[in-house]
């Protein structure tokens, strides 16, 4: 389904000839997450090019040795002075010889805590997407990375903590948020960014009501002292506070967090971050208003944290339409002028292109009326949403009967047709409902955490996208007060509904990317299970706010521990924040699938898109990934994909990302697939391109794990061989 655009291609050739800014984000190594602080995923290396890419062979593979069936590696590794820095599935920091893969050192945060095996379990529960390198240009070389809620400062040469930073080489990210969040989930999955002698960090927080605020913080790289903080949920007297109807919400509501990382215009001293939704994701009755600075692109003075400008991409988000990647630094040729800008891809399938200094859009944006009627008491959807007129969406946003999957047998087709008729559909911004609201491109749809790549020579932005419909169904919450004689079984059932159902479903069957809990008692004993609740795992946050009695009750219910179920429930002493008591809950993250397990929407289910940002027009578009059974019939469907691409001056675009565990290279100018190979597990990460000793390498983390696919534990690195 390739789309060729001759006019757009001619414009690209013109841009190549006239560009005087072609290497602004150029990169001959991969020293920063995303390739550079501009986050372009671009390499100037061209030893590997369109003529010889078919000669790529595995140069080395490093097995971390600590994978299990549920772990992942989503790391975009960095390379500094010939050393390859990555992170294992259980959050061990790795330093390898970048040319051979030989181990130099490994830092184990679990061993550093002195927690023994319990500590090891704790640090196996979360995702890390990369690390940050700092040097003073002399002998001081540091690696910053987060293992769960701790930000570590590690000597890049030895792998030892630098004990003068924070407390013994680390700081607890629960601190410095302006309110007590010690019992709430706070972690960092995506690395921070360096500005002079500071590291600027965001965090991941709970998606539910019991969420910490997502304020942005800058710490001194030497001492770990807080240098500045930007309140993403404004406090009294701060701009944006007036956009929250409840004047006390800032004390209780969380989210609005930069979980996807940062980009930076170092010359101008501007750091850019993009925020997620305010919590709770799907009900806004306790957080009425447009809600700055949730779902916003933020341009901050990197030295002080002061706001320079903002742009909100979704007002009063009740669909979990987080901004899932940081902006990309781009330069636009518009009416004969070069304009430095940022490009932001979104879960909605939109791309916003904004002036880097002012936040002004370079293409028209229309505040468009959207459905307002919500059957959920107390909810007040925002009346309009910003719709960019160019570029056009890179993913479908509405599911109609004409869009249904016709590759399945008629009985299956009739089933999805009947189910669609019972859901709310027809507008991307239909409010959540009890009958079910279609979410498209999907909760993981449009652009995901890998983000786009950008080629300054041509002005092309490359975005990989998902088109998977999901169904969001709300139910009345069980807010019946606990009885004085409540048993563990009764309390466990009630607490499961309030705490676990949104991810694992009302029947514990699992939803979306979340696993089933049926027969989980064959995998975990009571102690292991309650530890899991306390620490979190992958997409599951830690539920430290639950008391020991509540954890025991949930364990008795889910693990079917007969001896504990009849015991009297011991309620918590601490009274729960009333803001966390919601009238509605979601039944889970449910994909809209056929009986055979395919997306209910007709292909493509995953795409790769090349957009000329000078014009807003598409250069080419193709499917990304394959289902083998359809590929055998000559049907290229695309697959769900996570992670991003890397592009090179050699004319190539490298991407893994797909659920079929392939690694691919495309001609970046035409979209032609030039090379593909099988990986030992899915590469749900962004590749890194680097040079050591005059030789070019391409690396990909093979962690698998997502989409209930096989997990892996290795980094695979390719280089040219002789054929």
Image (tube, grey):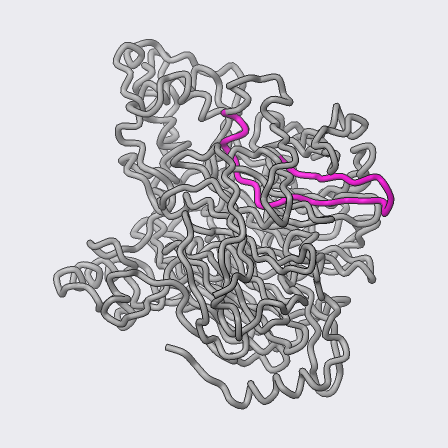
Q: Position of residue 492 (x, y in %)?
A: 35, 22
Range of residues picked out in magenta: 121-146
- Magenta stretch holds residue 129: yes
Give the quarter of the image for residue 361: bottom right
Q: Quadrant of residue 231?
A: top right
Question: Could you tell me how many numbered marks the image carries?
Answer: 0
Residue 222, position in %: x, y? 82, 35
Residue 110 visible, this orientation:
yes
Left or right side of 70 for 58: right
Residue at left 28%, top 66%?
631
Membership of 113 in magenta stretch: no
Residue at 69%, 52% in the rendered image? 32
Q: Is residue 268 left or right of residue 179?
A: right
Residue in view at x 20 percent, y 54 percent: 595
Answer whether residue 245 is visible to the viewer in this image. no
Q: Quadrant of the N terminus?
A: bottom left
Measured as percent of width and height from the top left, residue 72 is found at: 47, 41
Residue 479 vs residue 12: left or right?
left
Give the residue displayed 50% in from the left and 31% down from the top: 124
**In the image: residue 229, left or right of residue 92:** right
Name of the residue lying farthest toward the left: 411
Could you tell me residue 27's position as x and y percent?
70, 62
- From this view, report whether residue 720 is shown above or below residue 649: above
């Amino acid at each position: 389904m390739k789309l060729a655009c001759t006019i757009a291609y001619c414009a690209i050739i013109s841009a190549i000839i006239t560009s005087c800014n072609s290497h602004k984000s150029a990169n001959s190594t991969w020293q920063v997450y995303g390739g550079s602080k501009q986050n372009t995923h671009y390499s100037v290396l061209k030893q590997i090019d369109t003529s010889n890419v078919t000669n790529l062979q595995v140069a080395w593979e490093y097995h971390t040795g600590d994978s299990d069936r549920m772990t992942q590696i989503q790391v975009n590794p960095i390379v500094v002075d010939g050393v390859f820095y990555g992170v294992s599935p259980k959050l061990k920091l790795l330093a390898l010889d970048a040319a051979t893969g030989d181990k130099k050192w490994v830092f184990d945060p679990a061993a550093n805590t002195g927690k023994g095996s319990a500590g090891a379990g704790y640090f196996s529960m979360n995702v890390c997407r990369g690390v940050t390198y700092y040097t003073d240009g002399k002998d001081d070389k540091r690696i910053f990375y987060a293992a769960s809620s701790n930000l570590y400062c590690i000597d890049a040469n030895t792998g030892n903590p630098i004990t003068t930073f924070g407390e013994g080489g680390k700081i607890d990210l629960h601190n410095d948020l302006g309110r007590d969040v010690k019992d709430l989930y706070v972690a960092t999955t995506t690395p921070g960014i360096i500005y002079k002698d500071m590291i600027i960090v965001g965090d991941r927080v709970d998606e539910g009501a019991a969420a910490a605020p997502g304020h942005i913080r800058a710490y001194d790289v030497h001492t770990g002292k807080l240098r500045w903080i930007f309140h993403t949920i404004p406090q009294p007297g701060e701009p944006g506070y007036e956009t929250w109807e409840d004047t006390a919400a800032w004390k209780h509501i969380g989210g609005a967090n930069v979980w996807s990382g940062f980009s930076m215009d170092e010359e101008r001293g501007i750091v850019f971050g993009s925020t997620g939704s305010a919590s709770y994701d799907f009900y806004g009755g306790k957080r009425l208003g447009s809600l700055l600075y949730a779902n916003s692109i933020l341009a901050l003075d990197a030295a002080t944290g002061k706001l320079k400008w903002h742009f909100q991409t979704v007002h009063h988000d009740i669909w979990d339409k987080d901004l899932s990647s940081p902006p990309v630094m781009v330069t636009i040729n518009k009416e004969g002028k070069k304009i430095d800008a940022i490009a932001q891809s979104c879960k909605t399938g939109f791309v916003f292109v904004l002036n880097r200094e002012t936040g002004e859009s370079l293409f028209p944006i229309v505040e468009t009326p959207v459905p307002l009627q919500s059957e959920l008491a107390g909810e007040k959807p925002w009346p309009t949403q910003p719709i960019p007129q160019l570029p056009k969406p890179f993913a479908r946003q509405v599911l109609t009967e004409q869009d249904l999957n016709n590759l399945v047998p008629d009985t299956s087709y009739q089933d999805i047709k009947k189910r669609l008729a019972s859901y709310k559909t027809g507008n991307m911004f239909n409010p959540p409902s009890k009958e079910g609201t279609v979410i498209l491109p999907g909760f993981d749809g449009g652009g995901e955490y890998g983000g786009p790549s950008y080629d300054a020579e041509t002005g092309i932005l490359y975005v990989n996208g998902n088109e998977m419909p999901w169904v969001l169904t709300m139910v009345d919450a069980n807010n019946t007060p606990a009885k004085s004689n409540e048993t563990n079984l009764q309390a466990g059932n009630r607490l499961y509904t309030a705490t676990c159902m949104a991810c694992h479903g009302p029947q514990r069957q699992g939803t979306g990317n979340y696993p089933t809990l049926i027969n989980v008692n064959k995998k975990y004993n009571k102690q292991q299970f309650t530890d899991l609740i306390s620490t979190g795992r992958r997409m599951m946050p830690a539920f430290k706010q639950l008391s020991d009695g509540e954890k025991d009750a949930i364990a008795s219910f889910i693990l079917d521990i007969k001896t504990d179920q009849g015991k009297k429930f011991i309620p918590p002493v601490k009274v729960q924040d009333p803001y966390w008591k919601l009238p509605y809950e979601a039944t889970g993250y449910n994909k809209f699938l056929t009986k055979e397990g395919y997306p209910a929407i007709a292909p493509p289910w995953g795409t790769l898109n090349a957009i000329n940002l000078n014009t807003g027009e598409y250069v080419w578009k193709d499917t990304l990934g394959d289902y083998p059974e359809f590929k055998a019939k000559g049907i290229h469907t695309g697959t769900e994909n996570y992670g991003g691409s890397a592009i090179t001056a050699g004319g190539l675009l490298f991407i893994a990302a797909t659920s079929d565990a392939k690694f691919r290279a495309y001609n970046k100018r035409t979209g032609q697939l030039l090379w593909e190979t099988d990986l030992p597990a899915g590469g749900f990460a962004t590749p890194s391109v680097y040079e050591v000793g005059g030789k070019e390498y391409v690396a990909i983390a093979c962690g698998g794990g997502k989409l209930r696919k096989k997990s892996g534990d290795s980094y695979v690195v390719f280089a040219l061989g002789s054929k």
